[in-house]
Amino acid sequence: MSTAPDFDVVIAGGGMVGASLACALAQFCRVAVVESFPLNASAAAAPVYRPSFDARSTALSLSSVAFLEGIGLWSAVTRHAEPIRHIHVSDQGRFGSTRMDAADEGLEALGYIVENHWLGAVLHGALRERPNLRLIAPASVEAVTAVDGGAQLRLRVGDETRSLHAGLAVIADGARSALAARLGIDSEERNYGQTAVIANIAHAAPHAGRAFERFCDSGPLAMLPLTRAEDGRSRSALVWVKETADAAEILALDERAFLRRLQPTFGYRLGRLLAAGNRASYSLALVQAAEQVRAGIVVLGNAAHTLHPVAGQGFNLSLRDVAALVGVLRTAHTSGERPGDLRTLQAYADSRQADHSRTIGFSDWLPRIFGSGMLPVAAARGMGLVSLELLPAARSLLVRKATGLGL
Ligand SMILES: Cc1cc2nc3c(=O)[nH]c(=O)nc-3n(C[C@H](O)[C@H](O)[C@H](O)COP(=O)(O)OP(=O)(O)OC[C@H]3O[C@@H](n4cnc5c(N)ncnc54)[C@H](O)[C@@H]3O)c2cc1C
């Protein structure tokens, strides 16, 4: 196809990853985002923040914070983000535990926790406001086809079918990507047989910036510090990973029975657990697309790799992908090259390989070693936590990995 593309880049999916990429690319090229959900509905409204007990949250690494600063959104995100000043890692019923402190590392925070609904409100607000950026929603991308000079996208907008020509199509339609599958891109999937139960929890003692990661034989449990609730109570975001059958059981409990089950598992480091917001669940699998790039096409975010949430790395890894992709596309733009050129895209994919294998390997290894009740494995991980406590250099290394500073 020799006609000029309608947009330099069209992104299928305006979730956290697609929206972040769009905001970064709009600094130097023409971008469209196609999103199935009706984000246009509140076009005139400023993002509204309602601190509730009912939201999923994301731990942002310091590399993600730097990225959001670079696209001018961190000052808005940080208004409702809680800094992590300490991380406490322990093993239920065993002797090993370790602490990591921001101050020991010369850092203000080890990361930040933000509720997804606020992060989404800020990103989607930017999608509506930024010049160079067109949001097409609600609309679904039905098919992506590579063509000479980029890609062709078939869109369903209400009852109509439309076509868009892009210099580059980015597939960011989330886990188990239907669009990638339609292109014949294989994916490898390993089900963990585990489900993450999430809920916001109010507790009697202030969290004081402490994030807790507690490993139990049935799976890990995290309590991550949140901003205070509207009524002033201290809150944390719970991510409780259980075998799928056990998760179904705790999901069915009423609030009081749920808290009675959670309290002895987590302990009293946050005092008495007072209230639990709505619970939601996510079944956990490691999914990896076999191809990240083709001429005219990039697969990104959960569509490219869906990780176990134990290490809080999925979105952080994707933002590092986004930063690298924006870097190569900016260089291509400056030198007048097409954004869909395979050499440009392959350079991006090659540059991401080492981080992918490190981060995906780490996120996959943690739940397997810490999800095991087998005595030698459990003893070894207890020893591991003790050695981390005794070896500040090793702990610093782990902190640098967790914060995204050492990648
Ligand atoms: C319990 C849990 C906790 C987590 N905690 C963390 C954490 O602390 N830190 C971290 O870094 N990561 C975390 N993650 C991972 C993180 O949530 C994901 O990496 C992130 O949500 C991926 O975003 P995405 O934009 O790729 O996909 P999605 O958020 O799924 O977005 C995909 C978008 O595409 C749209 N869409 C789908 N099909 C089409 C179509 N055909 N046309 C148009 N639009 C379409 C959808 O409507 C959606 O908006 C966690 C995950 C879970 C499950």
Image (spheres, rainbow, N blue to C red):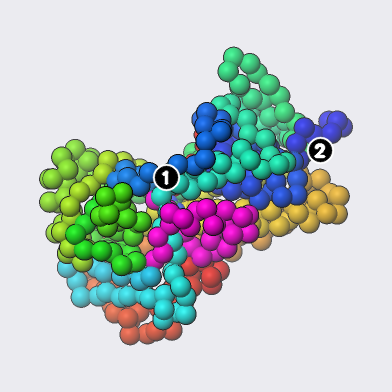
Residue bearing the label numbered 1: 49
- Judge the density around disc 1: few (<14), some (14-19), many (≥20) Cα neighbours within 10 Å: some
The residue mark sitting in front, 2 or 1, is 1
The reply to whether residue 126 is in sight is: yes
Quadrant position of the C terminus in the picture: bottom right
Q: Position of residue 272 (x, y in %)?
A: 15, 59
Q: Is residue 374 left or right of residue 363?
A: left
Residue 231 located left or right of residue 316: left
Please, what secondary structure does the residue beneath circle 1 have?
A: loop
Q: Whole-Å distance between the Cαs marked 2 and 1?
A: 42 Å
**Range of magenta residues:** 57-84
Residue wearing tag 2: 149
Front residue of this view, candidates 76 and 3: 76
Dot placed on the residue nearer the N-terminal end, 2 or 1: 1
**Residue appearing at x 68%, y 21% in the figure:** 162
Is residue 283 magenta-colored?
no
- What amino acid is labelled 1 in the image? Tyr
- Kind of residue sitting beneath label 2: Gly
